[in-house]
Image: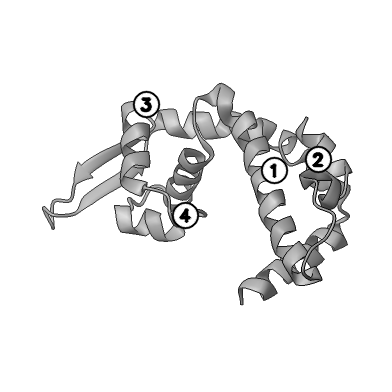
Amino acid sequence: MAATFVAMGLEEAIRQEKFESEHQKAAINILFTSSWLYNLNALFLKPYQITPEQFNVLRILRGSHPRALRLADIACRMIDKSSNATRLVEKLRQKGMVSRTVCESNRRQVDIHITPKGQRVLEKIDKESGHWTTALQKLSRDEAHQLNRLLDKLRG
């Protein structure tokens, strides 16, 4: 069903005929497309029993492996800055995908590592990761590069 929304224009997808400006339409289009991609990602990750936010935490920890990260380090690297990193790490710890240990040199600091189980889950996801990005293959490499450049410019 989600692919249907991409095939149609924004106006048809959200049933809105007019926008105040092209800039307003662009902002709404970015938000709509972000939600659409998020839902594709969530659907892809569901069989692995993790959310997109948990997946983001695992990827961050894998990127720093074998070095541990503190909660603040994870939070500042997350895609969704409003995510509750403490809660996400705890859910992943309960699933056996991350471990938390008190730092020996600073008892107030907690070091967070990805576990072998978390690594295995990411390896399985990596083997199928092209599946959820299939929709992006509608863009040429040059178009994807241009989109990335424009989005970076927007945030810059």
Tag 4 or tag 1, which sits nearer the N-term? 1
Query: Residue 55 at x, y = what percent?
Result: 51, 39
Q: Secondary structure at mark 3?
A: loop
Tag 2 or tag 1, which sits nearer the N-term? 2
On the image, numbered disc 3 is attached to which residue? 95
Is 134 left or right of 46, judged from the image as shown?
right
On the image, numbered disc 2 is attached to which residue? 5
On the image, numbered disc 4 is attached to which residue? 78
On the image, numbered disc 1 is attached to which residue? 36
Label 4 neighbourhood size at 10 Å, few (<14), some (14-19), many (20+)?
some
**Mark 2 or mark 4, whichever is nearer to me:** 2
Looking at the picture, which amino acid does disc 1 mark? Trp
Q: What residue is shown at x 13% (from left), y 57% (from top)?
A: 105
Alpha carbon distance from label 2 to label 4: 27 Å
Is 40 left or right of 108, judged from the image as shown?
right
Looking at the picture, which amino acid does disc 4 mark? Met
Query: Residue 155 at x, y = what percent?
Result: 61, 72
